[in-house]
Amino acid sequence: MAFRLLGGRNRTSQGALVTTPLGHNTEEADAGGPEEPAPTRAATAPPRFAKPPSTASVIGWTGLSAIVPGAAHLRAGRRRTGFALLGAFGLILVTAVVLALVLRSNLGLAVKDSTLVAVTVVAGVGALAWFTLVLTSYVALGPQRLPQSGQVVSGVVVGVLCVTVMAPFALTASSMVTARDTVNAVFPSDPDPAASVAPVKQEDPWNGRRRVNFLLVGGDAAGNRTGVRTDSMTVASVDVRTGNAVMFSLPRNLQYVRFPKGDPLAARFPDGFTGDSGQGLLNEVWQYAEDHVGKGKGPQELKSAIGHTLGLEIDYYAIVDMYGFAALIDAIGGLRIRVEQDIKWGGHFGTAGTIKAGVQRLDGEHVLWYGRSRVDSDDFSRMSRQRCVMGALLDQATPSVVLANFGKIASATRHMFRTDIPRDLLEHLVPLALKVKDARTTSLQFVPPTIWPGAADWVKIRRLTARAIKQSENAAARTVAAGASASPTAASPTAPASPGGTPSGLAQGTTASPSAGTPAATPTPTHSRLAARPTPSKTPTPNDQTAKTLADACGF
């Protein structure tokens, strides 16, 4: 009995040992009656409830879920949903990284029409998905347990958050729509069948060519002029393998250009183009063809004349309206240009102002005047300045600048740019343009004393063109060889230039062997008008026959 009173192990009627707490009456068990289970401490403890959430915690966890999907659901105890959202988010991140790497290796894919449409759709779906995510995260945290003031405050903040998370997706979708509309408006999907534009083959977009030649035109269609005047004409010859490029600048007042056999204007002007005015300036060819050959024939005839002059086949052209170009410069925040000497601008006497010498950041209007001012200058000086403007734009229009000002740039481009580059070629052109940006670009101007516009030596022009291209190709070969080996390269050195600019071994009147793919230069008769024309003795602009890099010529 004493053992029972003190508590201890007892046996039931079936002989099983049981432990009784101190003071527990075991007589009922001894009597063989039913034994109640011993109460435990957990059964007698009061129930525990989760601490009610605060307004700040609801807002904080909802905001965190917009960055890390599933965080709010995990906090609310909905682990299955939370881990599912977190896993889906991880999969999205991995997919985005893979796509970014693919696009980085081939940026041309980014401008494909299908890519732009796909990104637009994904951005729209993403906006709705993140809106739903924020809303469901807020509901999962149980805002109904907040006091009334907390419910109002958290509801307003979460509403603003829902709109905020949709903004980046909406901006992306809007940018893609703008980009697609601009690209499709500028680059023709169905080029003019009469134009000499070869169809684009995806496996070989350049049709087996090692070089592709672009005619870049600056057009001036001011209200006080009839038609379009092509005041700036530059051919960019690009090596599609290396990106090395040569820019050939032709003066607007180059006279009596010839056309290749079979061209509609070749029979009309067998001794050189004279146009309606009789002066036969190169910048009249475009509008003359529009008026006399047919609407839309201006670009083709200008390509034909310039290509025949240089001994190159001009593949594509692009014309930029001068005033639209000024808007483009403003869109990227201006250009930083080294001004060699004071440039007066405004009218014929430069009464509007002066662009001071030195390194200046110029807005669109002043860049336009810098490139076009004739005050105390000549056409050849203008060509040099225009060349530097193009080089500065190429150098300073970085991807980050373009993305930061994308909307303004797209708007300016759509109204200033016209080309016959096919839409399907754009995905191959973008990688080539980036390659050119990082490669070596040289430039050569056909201006006095090298070439006199009124008495041009057509054979010499072709010879200089072939030589500049050969030099560019040799430089590319040396670069490749230097990258493959640290030892001195075995590439053939470029022929040194004599003081007069003629390469050693070439007399002034001889013809150099043109580079591969360049037609041989053939002498052409000089126009009869030139017989009595005196040759000027000097020009305000010093020039030579050597193609220079833009960095050397413009001080980049």
Image: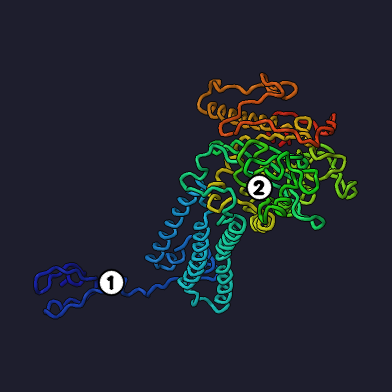
Residue 386 to residue 77: above or below: above
Mark carried by residue 40: 1
Q: Position of residue 477 (x, y in %)?
A: 55, 28
**Dot 2 crowding, Cα within 10 Å, few <14, some 14–19, many 20+:** few
78 and 125: which is toward the camera: 125
Q: How is the image coloured?
A: rainbow
* Among the 4 quarters of the image, the one containing residue 43: bottom left
* Among the 4 quarters of the image, the one containing residue 160: bottom right
Tell me which residue sits at (75%, 29%) in the image: 544
What's under tag 2, amino acid-wise?
Pro
At mark 1, the secondary structure is loop
Q: Position of residue 307 (x, y in %)?
A: 65, 40
Mark carried by residue 239: none
Name the front one of labels 1 and 2: 2
Quadrant holding the N terminus: bottom left
The reply to whether residue 80 is in sight is: yes
Q: Position of residue 247 (x, y in %)?
A: 67, 38
45 and 396: which is toward the camera: 396
Q: Which residue is mark 2?
A: 264
CA–CA distance in space, label 1 to label 2? 109 Å
Tell me which residue sits at (50%, 40%) in the image: 208
Pointer 1 or 2: first along the chain? 1
Tell me which residue sits at (78%, 44%) in the image: 371
What's under tag 1, amino acid-wise?
Thr
The reply to whether residue 235 is in sight is: no
At mark 2, the secondary structure is helix
